[in-house]
Image (spheres, grey):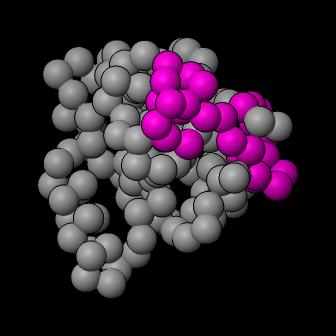
């Protein structure tokens, strides 16, 4: 399994992450078969957005409803780790459902993709997957 994202789209997300430092950014990824077709930024409504993220529930509910009604399929989520690695944290694992969705973690420079599954190798929740982004720099996890 891998996550395909255009270098232009990844660059946009990295710019959003840099512009928000020191806060974490977050949002949703849409597409099929591991290919990101679009993303939707969401407000980070976490109590402490400097250390955690929580996607605005209105965005989540709207995306789930839209998918159910034949709209864009939800591929997964993205968020940033300002000043940190692009590895999932224990907090990420604690909040991730083992629903098979993909997670993109970025820090303004590097990025990595993860699959949220039951009994993953990382904190029992994530498995590293290849991030396929032709022309982009700073990819990790599964390169």
Q: Which x, y percent locates residue 136? A: 78, 46
Tell me what residue is drawn at x 46 percent, y 64 percent. 30
Name the foreground residue: 32 vs 12.
32
Establish if 39 lies above or below 113: below
Q: Is residue 93 magenta?
A: no
Q: Quadrant of residue 113?
A: top right
Q: Is residue 140 magenta?
A: yes
Tell me what residue is drawn at x 40 percent, y 49 percent. 99
Establish if 100 lies above or below 67: above
Q: Which x, y percent locates residue 70? A: 33, 84
Tell me what residue is drawn at x 26 percent, y 65 percent. 64
Q: Which x, y percent locates residue 14? A: 58, 40
Q: Which x, y percent locates residue 49? A: 28, 23
Quarter of the image for the C terminus: give it: top right
Q: Quadrant of residue 23?
A: top left
Kindly tell me whether residue 10 is visible in this rendering. Answer: yes
Kindly tell me whether residue 111 is visible in this rendering. Answer: no
Count of number-bearing discs: 0
Part of the protein shown in magenta: 115-141
Tell me what residue is drawn at x 24 percent, y 55 percent. 60
């Amino acid at each position: 399994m891998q996550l395909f994202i255009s270098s232009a789209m990844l660059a946009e997300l990295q710019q959003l992450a840099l512009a928000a430092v020191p806060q974490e950014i977050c949002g949703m990824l849409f597409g099929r078969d591991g290919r990101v077709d679009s993303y939707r930024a969401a407000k980070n409504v976490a109590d402490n957005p400097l250390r955690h993220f929580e996607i605005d529930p209105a965005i989540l509910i709207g995306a789930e409803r839209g998918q159910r009604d034949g709209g864009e399929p939800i591929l997964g989520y993205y968020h940033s780790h300002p000043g940190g690695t692009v590895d999932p944290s224990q907090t990420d694992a604690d909040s991730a459902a083992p629903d098979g969705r993909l997670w993109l973690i970025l820090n303004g420079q590097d990025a990595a993709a993860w699959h949220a599954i039951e009994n993953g190798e990382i904190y029992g929740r994530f498995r590293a997957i290849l991030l396929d982004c032709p022309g982009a720099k700073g990819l990790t996890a599964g390169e």
